[in-house]
Image: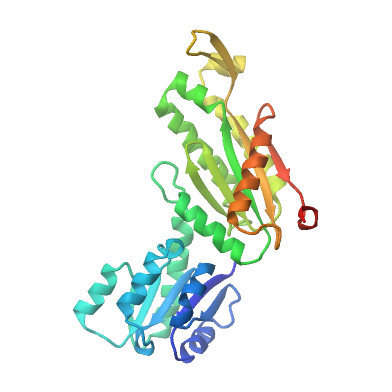
Amino acid sequence: MIQEIYLIDDNPDLKENLKKIFKGDKEYRFTSVATEKLDIALKNIPSLIIINEDNIKEDIVELCKKIKEDEDNSITPIIILSYNRDHEHRISMLELGISHYIINPIDEEYLYYTIKNILRLIYINRRVSPLTGLPGNVQIQAEMKKRFSSKETFAMVYLDLDNFKAYNDIYGFLKGDEIIKFTAKTILKNIHTDEYEDSFVGHIGGDDFVAIVSHIDYDRICQNIIADFDLNVTKYFTDQDAEQGYIEVENRRGVVEQFPLTSISIGVVEVEKGRFANVLEIGEAGASVKHLAKTIHGSTYVVDRRKHEETK
């Protein structure tokens, strides 16, 4: 996936210098953005923003606050380039949450590796969160909007556990957390590979997960996740429950009910240019197809294969 880098600089030299530094690397796209057009540009959610403080008319503090207060760009990293060496000024910028403050004139090699390392950390930090090591709803929404605005075809993969409440009722929440972590690892194992290095996996909450893949090889991904999950989930049940294939739970009326072992349901939505008006419509389609998957016994996946022409 192309890394969109915004350059806020009234002088075009910075853009040309960066293009030379990166030697035409097609993975990175440098876009000059005028301060008066920043509000519109931010809707596309760049991967990184570089501001040359010496060549802008707007106050740098107010400009950075505007970016950080934007819901979709609150976590977008910012690099400031400046001739201002004042210690207090530099510290005040870092206190605003700026990633790096680099003194002009720039060391091209230093800036090159700073940009590369920041974007690499973004990739790594996609997997960081308390229970599962995955990003939550804020990052998920930002990533969805970013992919959607790129106009490139991608697939949304929605994953949910079946009979998880019954499992928690019998085995307790600590054991339930173990299954959640196991599920996250299973999804990551089958999606975050060298083949699919630009994929994204998030934890919506509870037993709900989502993945975004830029390719359309979702059938194989879903099949691998299901096979891996079903093979190993029995480790989280007693031998008796695993052997009989179900657990027994007494409901509020005192009646004992049988529930199958925890399985995984997956709904897939292919997002192609023009099919959806916004990410909310994508979410609605995802909820619908995942609900359909959950009506089928056992681990399964259902794909919404409708094309744009069919939805007019």
Residue 82, x across and y down, in percent: 32, 85
Q: Residue at x 36, y 87 (%)?
A: 57
Residue 165, x across and y down, in percent: 50, 26
Q: Is residue 278 visible?
A: yes
Residue 62, x across and y down, in percent: 32, 75
Colouring mode (rainbow / by chain / secondary structure / one colour): rainbow
* Vertical order, 72 against 4 (above or below): above
Q: Residue at x 56, y 13 (%)?
A: 257
Dividing the image into 4 quarters, which one contains the N terminus? bottom right
Outermost residue toward the right in this view = 310
Q: Residue at x 48, y 35 (%)?
A: 180
Q: Nearer the viewer, residue 56 or 114?
A: 56
Residue 85 located left or right of residue 151 = left
Outermost residue toward the left in this view = 88
Q: Residue at x 70, y 59 (%)?
A: 272
Q: Is residue 300 visible?
A: no
Residue 310 located left or right of residue 211 = right
Q: Which of the 4 image quarters holds residue 154?
A: bottom right
* Vertical order, 225 against 273 (above or below): above
* Vertical order, 248 against 307 (above or below): above
* Vertical order, 252 against 46 (above or below): above
Residue 22, x across and y down, in percent: 53, 81
Q: Which of the 4 image quarters holds residue 91?
A: bottom left
